[in-house]
């Protein structure tokens, strides 16, 4: 199932895939996803379309804000 909300996406990444959304991981994914010439991005676009790519970029950006907000509080 393709996530339709931030919460579904976050659950998929962190629980189903077991990937912690660390600052380093999020920034590395954003670097790749924003690289228009990346083969990975081209494949992603072909499979899921531009609007989903933009949504995933937005979710990673939101996750980065969540993660950096935690760092300031601690």
Image (cartoon, rainbow, N blue to C red):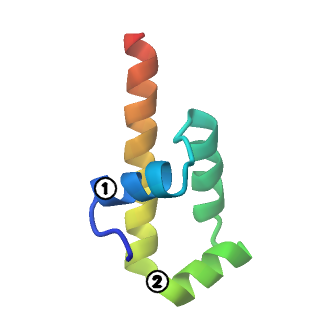
Classify 22 as above or below 4: above
Disc number for residue 24: none
Q: Residues within 10 Å of mark 2 (few under 14, many from 20)?
A: few
Q: Is residue 37 visible?
A: no
> Where residue 29 sits in the image (x, y, percent)?
61, 54
Residue 41, given in percent of the width and then of the height, sits at 62, 74
**Percent from the top left, x then y, of residue 72?**
42, 15
Residue 41 seen anywhere in this rendered image of the structure? yes
Side of 18 where 54 appears, left or right: left
Q: What kind of element bears circle 2?
A: helix
- Give the residue at x 63% y 83%: 43
Along the horizontal axis of the image, is 30 left or right of 5? right
Q: What is the spatial separation of the Cα atoms under label 1 and label 2, in whole angstroms?
A: 16 Å
Per the image, label 1 sits on a secondary structure element best described as helix
Contact (CB < 8 A) between labels 1 and 2?
Answer: no
Task: Relative to 23, say whether 48 is above or below.
Answer: below
Badge 2 is on which residue? 48
Q: Is residue 70 left or right of residue 17?
A: left
Quadrant including the C terminus:
top left
Left or right of 34 on screen, residue 4 = left
Q: Residue furthest bottom?
A: 46
Point 38% across, 53% down: residue: 11
Quadrant (top left, top right, bottom left, bottom right) of the N terminus: bottom left
Along the line of sight, the residue nearer the viewer: 24 or 31: 24
Q: Residue at x 37, y 12 (%)?
A: 73
On the image, the x and y values in percent for residue 51 come to 37, 77
Residue at the spot x=29%, y=53% of the render? 7
In front of the other: 41 or 6:
6
The residue at which mark 1 appears reads as 6
């Amino acid at each position: 199932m393709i996530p339709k909300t931030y919460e579904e996406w976050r659950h998929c990444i962190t629980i189903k895939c077991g990937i912690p959304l660390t600052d380093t991981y999020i920034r590395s994914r954003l670097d790749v996803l924003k690289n228009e010439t990346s083969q990975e991005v081209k494949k992603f676009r072909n499979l899921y379309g531009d609007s989903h790519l933009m949504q995933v970029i937005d979710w990673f950006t939101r996750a980065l804000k969540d993660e950096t907000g935690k760092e300031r509080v601690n």
